[in-house]
Amino acid sequence: MIGVYVPGASVLHRLPAGLKFVLLAASIITMTIVVRSPMAAGIAIGAAAASFVLAWVPAKLVWIQIRGVVWLLIALFVLQWILSDWRNALIVTAILFASVCLAAVVTLTTRTSDILSALTTAMSPLARLGVRTDLIAMTFALTIRSIPLIAQVFNQVDEARRARGLRPTPTVLLAPAVLATLQTADGFAETLAARGLD
């Protein structure tokens, strides 16, 4: 769900990247402190959904961004229900779901270059202490770019499995995906080494 930018001219698109990250952090902290009832949890999810409307992001693209965490959140809800009660499980799951939605809105409305510029600016005091902030920013950029690439690899492996009529077993899905991912990582390493970076 990271690394995809949707061009647009909405209010969220025009906000500075640094401000969006501050607002994202403030929103998550506020939800964690304030949301203590199912009704408040519903309001939090509604506000997160409203941010997608404010950003003018197509509903199909929104679903693509959040569908990867739906099953994880369902599993978390069941686990929380077993360990505590349904009310607490609903609140915890709702806060996480709303946080994921808000993070998706930020990445959908912010160019990667703007994210890196904001990150570099935020870390500028560390540069005075000798910290290579450019390497940290580059690592962050590679991480952002790698996540959709890995998801794409898994999709390609799954499509190949379906084309051959094979059952979705760990051996059929994971082994080729891991090998392809390692090859991609080797490609990144060779590119960085060719540019004199270690």
Image (cartoon, helix red, strand yellow):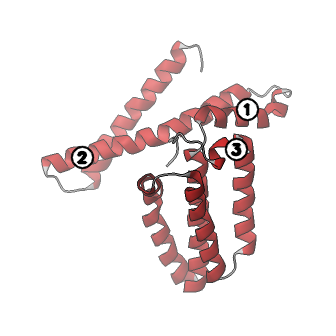
Residue designated by label 1:
120
Q: Position of residue 180 (x, y in %)?
A: 34, 35
Q: Residue furthest front?
A: 9
| Position of 139 relative to 150 (above/below) | above
Q: CA distance from mark 2 to mark 1?
A: 39 Å
Residue type, mark 3 in image: Leu
Give the residue at x 41% y 31%: 184
Along the line of sight, which residue is nearer the eye, 159 or 53?
53
Q: Position of residue 50 (x, y in %)?
A: 59, 63
Give the residue at x 50% y 42%: 4
Q: CA distance from mark 1 to mark 3?
A: 17 Å
Q: Position of residue 151 (x, y in %)?
A: 40, 45
Q: Secondary structure at mark 2?
A: helix
Q: Position of residue 67 (x, y in %)?
A: 43, 59
Give the residue at x 56% y 71%: 93
Along the line of sight, which residue is nearer the eye, 33 or 53?
53
Closer mark to the observer between disc 1 and disc 3:
3
Residue designated by label 3:
15
Residue designated by label 2:
159
Asked if residue 178 shows in the view, the reply is yes
Q: CA distance from mark 3 to mark 2?
A: 38 Å
| Position of 56 relative to 28 (above/below) | above
Image quadrant in which you'd find residue 148: top left
Closer mark to the observer between disc 3 and disc 2:
3
How packed is label 1: few (under 14 Cα within 10 Å), some, or many (20 or more)?
some
Along the line of sight, which residue is nearer the eye, 34 or 8?
8
Residue type, mark 1 in image: Thr
Image quadrant in which you'd find residue 167: bottom left
